[in-house]
Image (cartoon, rainbow, N blue to C red):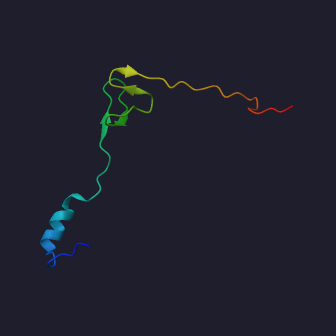
Amino acid sequence: MAVQKSKKSRSKRDTRRAHDSLKGDSLSTHPVSGEKHLRHHLTPEGHYGKRKFTLKKEKISEEPENSEE
């Protein structure tokens, strides 16, 4: 197992931790619809760039899969 040779100073420890803080999500405003969204993600209404995407829902059959009757 690795063991350090001497104690790390407060300065070295804090320098290492300088980038560990959590940052809030950076939100962008969509130019066409004006919606707020995460960068490189769809807007809540389905816009990405200059395109509009729609989600296709699958039909769920109400018949049982294994019918042994």
Which residue is the extreme one toward the front?
1
Figure check: 49 above or below 11: above
Image mark count? 0
Figure check: 12 above or below 20: below
Name which residue lies at 30% across and 26% down: 31
- What x and y, as percent, mark residue 35? 37, 32
Name which residue lies at 18% across and 64% down: 16
Q: Is residue 29 left or right of residue 68?
A: left
Which residue is the extreme one toward the top?
51
Viewer-nearest residue: 9 or 64: 64
- What x and y, as percent, mark residue 40? 32, 34
Viewer-nearest residue: 41 or 13: 13
Q: Is residue 40 left or right of residue 16?
A: right
Placement of the C terminus among the 4 image quadrants: top right
Q: Is residue 6 left or right of residue 60?
A: left
Figure check: 11 above or below 31: below
The picture quadrant where one finds residue 13 is bottom left
Placement of the N terminus among the 4 image quadrants: bottom left
- What x and y, as percent, mark residue 52? 41, 21
The picture quadrant where one finds residue 10 is bottom left
Name which residue lies at 76% across and 32% down: 64
Figure check: 36 above or below 18: above
Q: Is residue 15 left or right of residue 28?
A: left
